[in-house]
Amino acid sequence: MTAARRANPTDDVASVIANATVDGAELPDHETNGYYIIIATAGHDTTSSSTSGGLLALLEHPEELERLRQDVDGLMPTAVDEMIRWVTPVRQFMRTATEDYVLADQKIAAGESVVLWYPSANRDESVFSNPDQFQVDRSDAKQLAFGFGGHVCLGQHLARMEISALFKELLKRVDHIELAGEPQYMQSTFVGGLKSLPIRYKMK
Ligand code: HEM
């Protein structure tokens, strides 16, 4: 693909990666391959699940959809993070403790595996007020769907930008949206979300 995009660049993202230069030199194959894989895996199911799950949340909370419509630019930043918190598409990652530690009375010994449940963190009632409430203006705490620390999601700003751009355009063009069937979920213990979301809509 890299060779093909270098010979005949198109307007797709693969052409941008294949033809990128650093200090005047094209990227070696293992780096271009790394970028394709990141976009196809880390950057795909995560954003599509957050977008579709965010739309479902708006359809199930019409008063929140209406609030967002009234102030699209002002509320979009908090609405996007609330959609990502609500969906939390990455279910878990594992860490290995490097030293003994006590967390909330639980002893963790060096060398033990610790599973981080992101959906649980994002519904923590000691951190979020009314965590099971979907609120487009939520600003009481920072959601943790992108992880935390040295390996925090590298694509978080791109993800927020994609979701924000989609909803800004959608709300501008669509007059009415409603559910048109039962949403179906994918079965996953890692990255998960909606498999299909049947909707009916009317353009402006
Ligand atoms: C809503 C969308 C997304 C969510 C919820 C999400 C979530 C996560 C989580 C939980 C991690 C692990 C963090 C940790 O280990 O502490 C991660 C890492 C990562 N994500 Fe995302 N992600 C999203 C979108 C993206 C996009 C769009 C890209 C790139 C196009 C991306 C690229 C990466 C990469 C490269 C890492 C590894 C970072 C590292 O280990 O240093 N992600 N993401």
Image: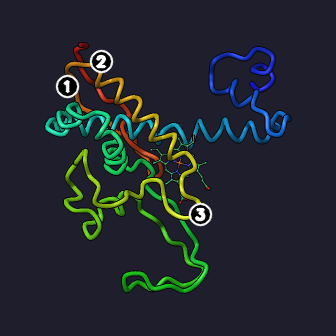
Q: Which mark is residue 128?
A: none
Question: What residue would you read off at disc 1?
Answer: 178
For the residues labelled 1 and 2, the Cα–Cα distance comes to 15 Å
In the rendered structure, which amino acid carries the disc numbered 1? Glu
Q: Secondary structure at mark 3?
A: helix
Question: What residue would you read off at disc 2?
Answer: 173
- Residue at (70, 24) in percent of width and height: 15
Q: Secondary structure at mark 2?
A: helix
- Residue at (41, 58) in percent of width and height: 144
Q: Count the labels in the image.
A: 3
In the rendered structure, which amino acid carries the disc numbered 2? Arg
Q: Given this view, does label 1 or label 2 mark the residue nearer the observer?
A: 2
2 and 3 marks in contact (CB < 8 Å): no
In the image, the residue with mark 3 has its CB under 8 Å from the nearest atom of ligand 1: yes
Q: Upstream in the sequence, badge 2 or badge 3?
A: 3
Residue 84 location (% of width, % of height): 37, 46
Residue 20 location (% of width, % of height): 75, 31
Q: Upstream in the sequence, badge 3 or badge 1?
A: 3
Question: What residue would you read off at disc 3?
Answer: 150
